[in-house]
Each structure stands twice: as C-alpha cells, then as structure tokens.
Image (spheres, grey):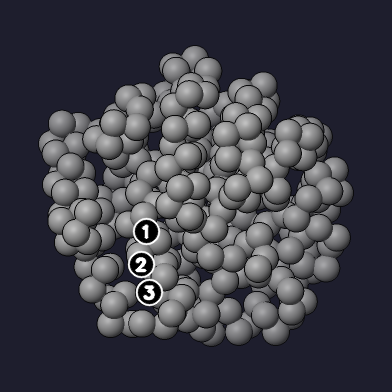
Amino acid sequence: MSLFEGLSAFPITPADPSGGVDTAALAHILVQIKDARADSIGLLGSTGAYAFLSREERRRAVETAVETVGGEIPIIVGVGALRTSDAQALARDAKAAGADGLLLAPVSYVPLRDKEVYEHFAAVADAGQLPLAIYNNPGTTRFTFSRDLISRLSNVPNIVAVKMPLPSDDDYAGELSAIRATTPSEFRVGYSGDWGGASSLLAGGDAWYSVVAGLLPAETLALTRAARAGDADRVKQIDAAFEPLWTLFKEFGSFRVMYVIAELLNLCKVDPPRPVLPLSDEARQRVAAAIDQLRVRQGL
C-alpha cells in the first residue's frame, strides 16, 4: 500500500500564544490516531497550523511525533514555506527526524506562476529525499495546479501524489480519470474537504486527507471503510451523522471548529493562533451538539 492511500488524519498542533508547541498534548492526540488505526498522520498540515510556527517548533513537533508513534503509523509532514530555501530546510529537518513523507503547498505572498511552482517543488523534493505529495489548496494559497502542471510534476523524482480540493462540479470520477491519464500508474490522487471525502473514495480516489480524523479518527474510519468497500448505502447513513459538523466546517472553517472539538473531547484546551479568534459561545454549543449527535448515531 502506498504512503498516500486510505485515511490520513490531520490533527491540530497544540501551542501556547507565542507558538510554543505543547508536545505532551500533541503526543496524546497522535496516540489516539494511531490506536484507531488510521492509515497515516498528516502532521503540520493546514489544520496543524504550520504557517504559524517557527522552524524550531515545527522540528519539535516532528520529533515528538516520531518519538511517540514513529514506526507504528506513517507520518507525513507539511513543509510549506514562503522561501524555497526554507521549505528545503524543513524537508531536511523532517527527514532527519524520521518522517515517512512530505506534503508541500506553494505558499507565497506574491502570486506564483507555473514555472516558479515547478522549480520550487523540484527543489524541495530533491532536498527532502522522501515521497512527497503536492498540496493543491487554492482556497489558502490562491494558486491552482493545472492538470498539465500536475502531470509534469508527477515525473519529478520523489513527487508521488497529489492532495486535491473538492471539484466544484462534484465530478470526482471524471477528474480522477483525467489526472490518471497523464501521470504514472503509481501516482496517487486523494482529496481534502471533509464533506466530500467519502464521495471521493466511492469514486475511486486513493486517499482522504481528513481534518476531522485528526481528533475523531474512529468515527471517521467507519465512514472511510464503508466508502472504500463501495457500500454507498452505508456511506449515506454514516455521512448523515456527520452532516451537522460539515455544516459548521463550511460556516466557520474547519480550523476554528477543531479547537473547540479538542477541548470538548478533553484532548487539550488551547485557542487557535492569533489573529484567528476562538468561536463564540453560541457556535461552541452548536459544535458540542454536532459531536453528541455524531457519537449517538454511531453508537459511541
């Protein structure tokens, strides 16, 4: 099985207001993912607030993950940074700490062009010398990977997968077919955007890069297994239990909601990094109700 297949769980990175990682809280969250038997951990993804953390703190997070669950569940580390040289350094740090793979988004203040992104990814992939997934996240980076660019990058050594946003027309099968027609057979195509994760797997996607699995891995695995088994009726039933949570993700952003979930589950009590503000009491009550409904309907 490829590193970039199945359910990849993306946890928050608990940190104090100055960006110091709470390694004990992070370890507690990662053990829960490992024990639930997710297929991989997506450490320091967007949900993991990588953009808010220094190189030193990102290295501490990776070292904590490897010390806590390394060798028991694969660890994919986000290494996005504004400068190519910084992303290369982060990739080397991740490899040195014992990570299994890398995830790279084209982070930039200046809008990037295809050639610039190609050169950036080739340089980071070479520096890291680990399997690397392209992070196509236009909602955050404002850069959209064309199919031609994905195709060209898929032939760069060490670039072996792409993490796609949900297609606007919900045509997962069509998009998967188009990408696979111009990439190597071993190249893996997965999706983020939790409310479409099960649909992408049903359509034949290789991976679901899931935010909610970072804190609710057991519940998310039930949905993943049904989708990978092709059981559309079961998927519909389980996904209905998640619907209130998907609504909150769309309304407030999954990043903010996850910090509330972490506190509700007694995993840690931290606020999102400023300038992102915590949710209101009314919104928090809605999150609590959504989690209660999810667990009741799944019998947990």
The reply to whether residue 37 is visible in this rendering is: yes
- Residue, x 73% and y 39% (percent of image)? 98
- Asked whether disc 1 touches disc 2, contact meaning CB atoms under 8 Å apart, the reply is yes
Residue highlighted by disc 1? 220
Residue 37, position as x, y percentages in the image: 48, 55
* Residue displayed at 60% across by 84% down: 177
* Picture coordinates of residue 38, whole percent (x, y): 49, 55
Against 188, residue 45 (above or below) is above
Q: Earlier in the sequence, mark 3 or mark 1?
A: 1
Q: Residue at x 63, y 82 (%)?
A: 178
Q: Residues within 10 Å of mark 2 (few under 14, many from 20)?
A: many
Q: To which residue does mark 3 refer?
A: 226
In the visual, does 173 lie left or right of 245? right
**Residue type of the residue flagged with mark 1:** Thr
Question: In the picture, residue 90 is in which quadrant?
Answer: top right
Residue type of the residue flagged with mark 3 = Ala
